[in-house]
Amino acid sequence: MRVPRWLSTYRRLWGLLLVQRRTLLLALTAMALGAGATGAFATLTGPALRLLFTGGEVPPSFGGRWGAWLRALPAAELRAALPAALLGLAAVRAACAFVQADRAGALTLRAVAGLQEALHGRLLSLPMSYVQATHTGDLFSRFGNDLGEVQRAISQGLVSSVRDSLQILALIGVSALLDVRLLLLALLTVPATLLPIARFAAALRRVAAEAQARQARQVVAAQEAISGAAVLQAYGGEVSALRAFGSGEVELLGLERRSFAIRAAFTPTLELIAISALALVLAAIRGHTATVAPDALLSFLGAILLTYQPLKSLANGSQWVVPGLSAADRIFTVIDAVPAIADRRGARSIERAQGSLHFQGVAVRYGERKVLSDLTLSIEPGEQVGIVGPSGAGKTTLLHLVPRLLDPSAGMVALDGEDLRGLSLASLRRQVALVSQDVFLFDASIEENVAAAAPGSSPARVEAVLEAAGALEFVRDLPDGVQTRIGERGASLSGGQRQRLSIARALLKDAPILLLDEATSALDGATEAQVQGALARLVQGRTVLVVAHRLSAVRGADRIVVLDGGRIVEEGSPARLWMAGGLYRRLCDLQRGAQAEG
């Protein structure tokens, strides 16, 4: 039998709590003691009121040594003992409530932190194709709104449901000891609660799923508006963007209103059923008083009334569990995504490669589209190879095969004669440094950004690579030098400055293989000349693959490979390819003509 998806998610959330056995056991113990104290409190309520207002002997319901001890007490001491006992039980309940709330809070926080770490770790291990196919804003909403819903579900639903259930069981047990027939009468209303609970839960689950998906789309829209603010303003798109966002907010508001309406109807419905149960009991008491002791009847009614609060809490908690399960399901969908690229069993770790690369019959597909077809290429250690061709020829895809950002659909890529898939990902990626056109810098200090390539590097080493990259001079002119924070994606720096920091990072990594992906294409001529000087120092003694549209960037290469339509159409030295008059020559002529016109 197939387990419903929501039930599987519910079990997984409990699994996050069961990992913390000691904390969970302490919380459960406090809950159980608190439930026992509540049951004892209800039991003593009737006798205490009887003795307080009418006097008399200890009721026959108090048997055994406990009853004998109470009967031996003088009446005055007995009247003082019972209120003290009630006060003691109230103190026990308060202490247990504090311990269970404190430990339940710790359980919730650790469970959510573990879930957040698992989500973050999975996103870091998933291939670029998955991340590119899912909008950044949608992924962010899982860290924000979805994790918040899960935290509420665990704290106000899962954990509290155990406390409430234990209290209900304790009070039902007390009621059964006092009068089974009245209890059975009260329980006649229980089946009536099952249908509304099931219907409310199903409706709330549908609305919650729709609302969370709509909320994710709103986060996507906001993120795109912030990232593309300059484009929106330049093209006068602010009004249409705001209108689209407002339309989404109206839809989200409608879903939230439906959710609130369902929740608003849920609790009163259950309260009505609970009051019906109490009314049945009160109606039955009229013909039942002769067979029930007054103190037992008072205790029974007290137990029934005390059951109301945990029942209400249980019902309210379920309203948080339902949207929390929908949110958890969205998070688990990402966590359960199987990485397309992972270490094989027995993958070997390497220290430092010599740097020879061999592509044998490589093909790469994106869905039905062929990007590379039957590509065979060998590169010797220390060789500099330029890769050129028209847009869409597969140049960047070829680079991404080296650090296994993607795997070929067919064929093999080898490093020093060994299939890349036989090497551990961590050790393979230690052999590769990447400098691309789109430089990513963290909102941290310059030192932290550069040292990300080799954590633990000394400040002197960081300054040395900054100098080698031609960046130390401008870094020293900044307010805090290498400790200057550079903003999101290095927003406070120019393009050339960001690129030189990227080169410094690659220098610090000191990998035997260097990948340059349009490293200077976005720079002006003067800045490109400065960066090229830094690159010249970077490429020394390494195997280098250079992808470039600007052909001046590859003229110093030992060999140029020309791609077109995912295939190698030309290969050789720059001079030889020029003389051959093929695609490389035509690309050179096109660029020369464009520069002349410019």
Image: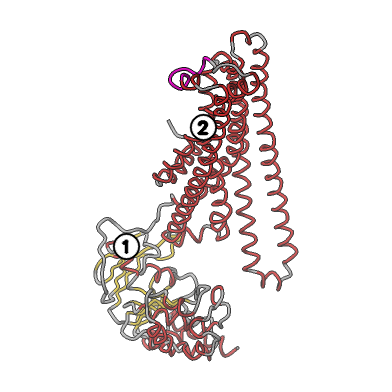
The local crowd at label 1, few if under 14, some if 14 to 19, many if 20 or more residues have their Cα within 10 Å, is: some
Label 2 amino acid? Ala
Measured as percent of width and height from the top left, residue 414 is found at: 28, 68
Measured as percent of width and height from the top left, residue 200 is found at: 63, 33
Task: Inspect the magenta stretch and tell me whether residue 453 lies in it.
Answer: no
- Above or below residue 297? Residue 314 is below
Residue at (37%, 75%) from the top-left corner?
456
The local crowd at label 2, few if under 14, some if 14 to 19, many if 20 or more residues have their Cα within 10 Å, is: many
Label 1 amino acid? Gly
Gap between marks 1 and 2, in whole Å?
71 Å
- Above or below residue 527? Residue 162 is above
* Circle nearer the N terminus (1, 2): 2
Residue at (60%, 29%) from the top-left corner?
306
User: Which image quarter: residue 204?
Assistant: top right
Measured as percent of width and height from the top left, residue 334 is found at: 47, 52
Task: Inspect the magenta stretch and tell me whether residue 66 lies in it.
Answer: yes
Say which residue label 2 marks: 37
411 left or right of 225 in image: left
The segment highlighted magenta reads: 60-68
Say which residue label 1 marks: 411
**Is disc 1 in contact with disc 2, using a CB cutoff of under 8 Å?**
no
Measured as percent of width and height from the top left, residue 148 is found at: 57, 51
Q: Image quadrant for the N terminus?
A: top left
Query: Which structural element holds mark 1?
Result: strand
